[in-house]
Amino acid sequence: MSKQVNPCTFVLFGASGNLSRIKLIPGLFRLDAAGRFPAEMKILSIGRGEMSREAWQAEIKGMLDAKFKNGYDQEVYQRFIARNFYHANPPTDPDAFSKLKNALSDEKVFPQNLAYFLSVRPTDFATIVQQLHQVGLTDESKYWRRVLIEKPFGTNLQTAQALQAELTKYLKESQIYRIDHYLGKSAIQNIMLTRFTNAVFEPLWNHHHIDHVQITNNETLGVGDRTTFYNATGALRDMFQSHLLQTMALVAMEKPKDFTPESIRAEKINLLKSIRPVDVNHLHKNVFRAQYAGGRVDVGDGHSEKVLSYLEELKRDGVDSSKTETYAAVKLFVDNERWKGVPFYVRTAKRMHEGNTAIAIRFKKSPIELNGQQQQNWLIINIQPRECIKMEVQSKIPGLDIATRTLSIDAPQRQQGDESIDSYETLLLNLMEGDPSQYLHIDEVLAQWRLVDPIVEAWAKDDTPVHQYPAGSRDPLESKVIFEGQDQFWRYSIELGGDKF
């Protein structure tokens, strides 16, 4: 059920950056094409250098031409381009934000409800908010004012708390929208709806019936030109701290009392606070890290290419050694009645044999043993590259003998004619609607950092050589050290049936 966007001005800082060109401006265009904007809505792009409105509109046309190579509706384009304005905000001008206020104060042009998107360096978040506040552009006495903060929100618990302390000098918590673009994905939102709108699942969603849960994000790509960022961050802080813990919260949380943003957030926060801290005194039984070595990766059409190791990529950029992980697997437990004793295996890695994001739930063994085996059912919610739900059940093989085989039930979530919505489009609309349910509350951010920081600190003190795995390979055999059961194995969601170690 769609909401109505109040007339507002979308103020985009960092408008000339890569994210804006590839995602944000095209995303705003698609929302306009979908009829989600009121006629009065305007877009003010903020850049460092001077540029005429006409020149900026020509830039926008270039962005849209690059994004929509098959063309786009010219009537929508004319409507969209008329919404767009440009304002120069040079960092060297001490009066820059006063000039911005003067520009925005023209109520005949710009609606006074203001949605700020800070597509800028994390070090600039607090500074921009302070300067907006100083000229009265965050004041909500007459109109709403919201600020979207791009990730990362801090690099550890201490920096996240410090950033929060700075922002809340000038903003209320209700004005801060901390983005995690994963939460905008339709397949991620489907996790909660799959659980709570199907009576067949909820009675089984507990430790009585579930053996374990796997949450996976694997990529075939390496770190590319992000070596400086990645070497300072690693897989754990890049993916696990935000995207994967948020996915786990949706998988494991209790049913909210209703589907309001406040109720959904409250249950996610409760779940994140219920995750047991990793026992760093027994680190090697609970977490595993590795780096990709050189190898070959699939590039499609039956071809592969040779790629460098992570360490070779670093050396190319002047870094001689590193213990930063490109593969991280963590075993977690939730300390509540529903999940008592159920391990959650959360893994993320680069340069794997396949790219996929999925939740794989293995149920406990069947009550009947045939031929010395008790079979187990799987439920897989695939996020990408293919959005689908898969179940594996046992069925009798037709014939005279009593024997079973695994049948896979595969239901694509995305069907012909469905809207194809980018996650940023969803989140842009939520910002303007005032719906924070797909954004991170500060309590979620801090709970996530409290789980991650002890692992990062323990790894920093650990002199054990970091394991190497060939690029293009499957999970390192050594990673199964975190498994609770001898019969547990990494599930590969795309290939039904999986591969056992």
Image: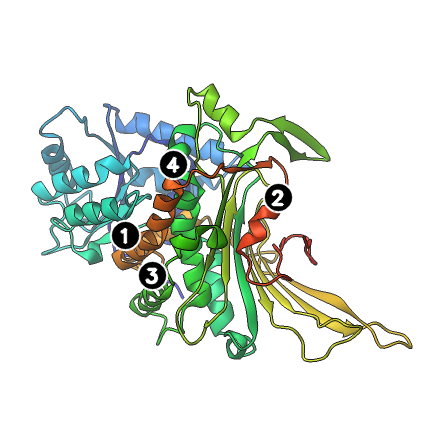
Disc number for residue 491: none
The tag earlier along the polypeptide, 3 or 4, is 4
> Dot 1 surroundings within 10 Å: few (below 14), some, or many (20 or more)?
many
Which residue is the site of mark 4?
Answer: 19
Q: Comparing marks 2 and 3, which lies closer to the viewer? A: 2
Residue 354's disc is 2
Q: Above or below — where is 84 with respect to 186?
A: above
What amino acid is at disc 1? Answer: Tyr
The N terminus lies in quadrant:
bottom left
Give how far apart the Cα atoms at labels 1 and 4 are. Answer: 17 Å
Q: Residue 29's x, y, as percent? A: 40, 43
Dot 1 corresponds to which residue?
Answer: 177
Q: Residue at x 70, y 58 (%)?
A: 497
Disc 3 residue crowd, few under 14, some 14–19, many 20+, Cα 10 Å = many
Can I make out residue 348 in this image? yes
The amino acid at mark 4 is Leu
N-terminal label among 1 and 3: 1
